[in-house]
Image (tube, rainbow, N blue to C red):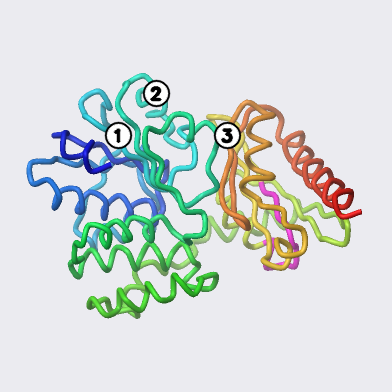
Amino acid sequence: MMRTVKASKRVLILGHQNADPDAVCSGYLLARLLRRANKRLKPVVVSPDGVSKVSARMLEHLRFRVAQDAQPTEFDVVFTVDTNTLQQLGSLREPVEKSGRPLIVIDHHAVHADTRDRAKILISDEEATSTCEIVYQLYKAMRVEPTRREALAAFLGLAYETGHFAIATTKSLRLACELLDHGVDGTKALNIIRVPMDNSERIARIKAAKRLNWQNIGGWIIASSTVSSFHASVARSLIGLGAQLAIVGGEKNSGLTLSFRSTSEFYSGTKLHLGRDLAAPLGESMKGAGGGHSTAAGATVQGNLDEAIGKCVELFRAFLDRSRKSAE
């Protein structure tokens, strides 16, 4: 990777649309690391169509700017961070594909086949709880000591992606302690990414609850609903209501957007990986793309919303059938 970087003058670092703190912070950390490795380098971090509300607040504390658009042909190499498929680049997907520039992918999601085929270099670790963890390991590999602000960025991305450490692993907790030793104030950092829920998000959750459908499949409670926005938040709320697998979808200008959440108990009991076994197959079957983690994933597809939710249920049933047959 560094050979490619050292031969470059301009580097483009892309996060996914509506970039969350992990995407923004990993982009920030990578830009700072590359700049320290090559002083003449000019890295530019871009989130197509902007960043999330919590990311915008976080960027003020990091004193860093993320652009919304760029021309990939103006750069020597393109990185993507925390981006499972190029479809998540929105309006920049096609320009990146047509640019002919080397693509370097850094991600912690289950690797999508299309991403594997397109990447010149793939740096992936599905066991990492955030992309920031992976980028931070590059600091260690290059023996670069992070500044206090860089440590703060890594902590923020890690804390957000683990739900304020609710799903942190032993490895990520050790990293958090290491970052605190670099001068990060943990309490202040957590307050940066703790944004109160506004009324529009509350209303979306209530509407979704009114439209909720549920089934008991193989002893597991599967809940589904539709809402125009806040899909991930609504999916989390359905898990809070008692569902073990939540499927939430809505219509967007670009097609259908679906978010999936499950409990750790569900994953342990079924071994259904939401990114690999649900979101990705749904994307492939409905002219879109999907991916994510074992208990949190998403997909953007084309077609009818009820059909998409129905296919998700069918995929789960088929997975259970295969698992049962293999155990016989």
Question: Would you identify the image quadrant in which residue 287 lies?
Answer: top right
Label 2 vs 3, first from the N-terminus: 2
Element under disc 2: helix
Q: Are marks 2 and 3 in contact (CB under 8 Å)?
A: no
Q: Is residue 246 magenta?
A: yes
Amino acid type, residue under disc 2 in the picture: Glu
Q: Earlier in the sequence, mark 1 or mark 3?
A: 1
Residue 240: x %, y % from top left: 67, 68
Residue bearing the label numbered 3: 289
Q: Which residue is mark 2?
A: 97
- The residue beneath circle 1 is 78
Q: CA distance from mark 2 to mark 1?
A: 10 Å
Q: Nearer the viewer, mark 1 or mark 3?
A: 1
Per the image, is 325 magenta? no
Magenta part of the protein: which range? 238-248
Q: Residues within 10 Å of mark 3 (few under 14, many from 20)?
A: many
Q: Is residue 21 visible?
A: no
Residue 61 figure quarter: bottom left
Name which residue lies at 37% across and 38% down: 121
Amino acid marked by disc 1? Val
